[in-house]
Image (cartoon, rainbow, N blue to C red):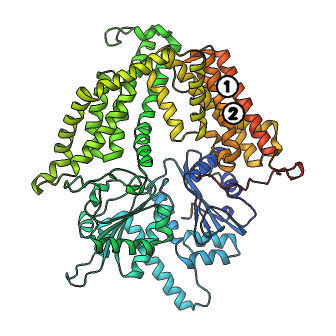
Amino acid sequence: MSELITAELVDLDLSAETKNEAARSLAERMVTAGRVTDLDGFLADVAAREAQMPTGLDGGIGIPHCRSEHVAAPTLAFGRSARGIDFGAADGPADLVFLIAAPAGADDAHLTILSSLARRLMDPAFTEALRAEANPAAAAALIRGEQAPAPAGTSPAAERNASADRDTADKHVADKHVAEEDVADEHVPDEPVTGEPFRIVAVTSCPTGIAHTYMAAESLEAAARAEGVVISVETQGSAGFKPLDPAVVAAADAVIWAHDVEVREKARFGGKPVVDVGVKAGINRPAELIAEARRKAERGEVSRFTDDHDGSDAGAGAGVSGGSAGHFGVRLRTYLMSGVSYMVPFVAAGGLLIALSFAIGGYEIASAPSVADHFAWGEANSWAALLNQIGGAAFGFLVPVLAGYIAYGMADRPALVPGFVGGAIALTIDAGFLGGLAAGLLAGAVVMAIQRVKVHPTLRGIMPVLVIPLLASMVVGFLMFIVVGKPIASLQKALTDGLNGLSGSNAVILGVVLGLMMCFDMGGPLNKVAYAFAVGGLADPTDGSLKVMAAVMAAGMVPPLAMALATTVRSRLFTRAERENGRAAWVLGASFISEGAIPFAAADPLRVIPSVMAGGAVTGALSMAFGSTLRAPHGGVFVVPLIGGPFLYLLAIAAGTAVATALVVILKGMRRSPEETPTAADEPKVPLAA
């Protein structure tokens, strides 16, 4: 780990009072060391990761981390706080803060080393040694593993033995990433049937797959050793994952999932009792999870998801991140977001290609003949037609991809085929975006129903690759063509006609609703629903759908622009970190990247979110009232030439930005008297929103 942390990246007297300030202080050391290229961009990525889930751990540890394009090399910075900093842990502030920065394309070796550090944080001797160390260079050596932590009062011989034990443990951790079979050999010895220990297989994962994934694995393994339980853990982290040996899974008495993202290839664990929790539960209460796994096994409980490889039982929780513990509304949102997230790259690529073709050849280029029949290398219109037709081909995948991955989110890989087939049928019968939603949900439900059926062992091998896709595609095709497709197509046509006929107050109301949705969670589910609704209209553009697209993009630009303006006109109301984020927010807002306002909303949600929602509603209403249109699904101010009524459109954005700015300044100004105005070193004390 010598290249990941040096003495210059250690601060044993961290004076920060909040996690934002702590992250900035440690990140500045990374910038000085040449490890981070863009401080504000990196801190925005850290804040976005923190917004997914607080990174505080029991035992006084804060471990903010992210993968970022602004990181030049995998880097670790360490800070020790005398007063403690709130990172959202249940047991209080953290005095040990580790900031982990991984490049977007970090290699597996570096990530494995980072995972090794995460595991060592579960060792009390390691953390206590860091609390006692007075020399930055020695602290860096301790973190690198070059200096072994020695508990107070141990003899040199005992210290050498402890060091040897730790070396053996570290080698075991490294071997787990190289060959899972070695783990199986160590944890699953050949024993007689009588008196066999209780066996558990576990999967751990977190959103970035850098820290919590491996800390949960180490915590579970330590608790299992203490309980006399045999455990094999599969870490699904950023360095990739090697599936557990099927024999190990088959021999397990129970399964523990400690995860915050989708468990990959979950069907392997079908028919066994499953304890399904978040990754932090695996870190903080592993003994409870093991005890719960024992109880479930004793009661004879089995999982309610499908084993794709043997056709065993299925249930409503199949394919859902987080398992069956979630409320139906939460699961439904997960299904829909799965489809939308896979659809967005097609939207971006296809939409921008079409927009570029219009910029080169005008709107009439959409009716040009196929470039396969006629293409002139020296004619601009031929190139414009080529771009338009490539973009149109990408757009043709929107509904099938949406349907296919909604189904995938519900029932995993066997649902992909019926989902795509249903989405293609939705296009055939003109059911559009709504038809794709229905097809995806139907496909997932049908596959889950088929998976419940008990089958003969001879058929189990072909169930996921032949039988389930075949039967599910037939059922979904029948339902889409004969039963539900036409009513949905009629509803889609009614909505399209309604958009075309929007005028006056009706259009303004729609603009208000879309503006509120775009600004509520700034890239979250509501934002994505509004955006997907607008993009769906671009597949078959009409005047109404183009107005909707314009309103959605205009409203989405308001949050970062408003925060940038607020930090400029009333800088004293904001901390130094927020003012620097505000400078970056100008570019993010102008580029239609709503996430540029997330650091502000995360730090002060009760003032920022209502303010930007009000501004977004004003912008959406004005854009619709002005009749502005937009044929590009992205681009911000850089696609102004493609906007119908560009001057009024920019006026709508400016008005909404002004409203949001005024509100956030007023609300923040009411928070404290002038003499209590924050200084450059202050940070807001409101905890980060989850």
Residue 609, percent across and down? 66, 42
* Residue 147 visible from this viewpoint: no
250, 654: nearer the viewer: 654
Task: Mark 2 or mark 1: name the one nearer the start of the chain.
Answer: 2
Determine the image quadrant of residue 343.
top left
Determine the image quadrant of residue 657.
top right
Residue 280, percent across and down? 50, 64
Describe residue 302's horizontal placement relative to residue 328 as left or right: left
Q: Which amino acid does label 1 sit on?
A: Ile
Residue 504, percent across and down? 60, 15
Describe residue 583's horizontal placement relative to residue 172 as left or right: right
Q: Residue at x 88, y 48 (%)?
A: 674
Image mark for residue 653? 1
Q: Quadrant of the N terminus?
A: bottom right
561, 70: nearer the viewer: 561
* Residue 30 visible from this viewpoint: yes
Marks 1 and 2: in contact by CB < 8 Å? Answer: yes
Q: Mark 2 points at which residue?
A: 561
Q: Nearer the viewer, mark 2 or mark 1?
A: 1
Q: Which amino acid does label 2 sit on?
A: Leu
Describe residue 63's horizontal placement relative to residue 293 as left or right: right
Q: In this view, does 556 lie above or below 332?
A: above
Image mark for residue 295? none
Instruction: Give me the C-alpha separation between circle 2 and circle 1.
Output: 9 Å
Secondary structure under tag 2 reads helix
64, 91: nearer the viewer: 91
Q: Which residue is drawn at 46% across and 67% down?
A: 282
Q: In this view, does 322 lie above or below 611?
A: below
Secondary structure under tag 1 reads helix
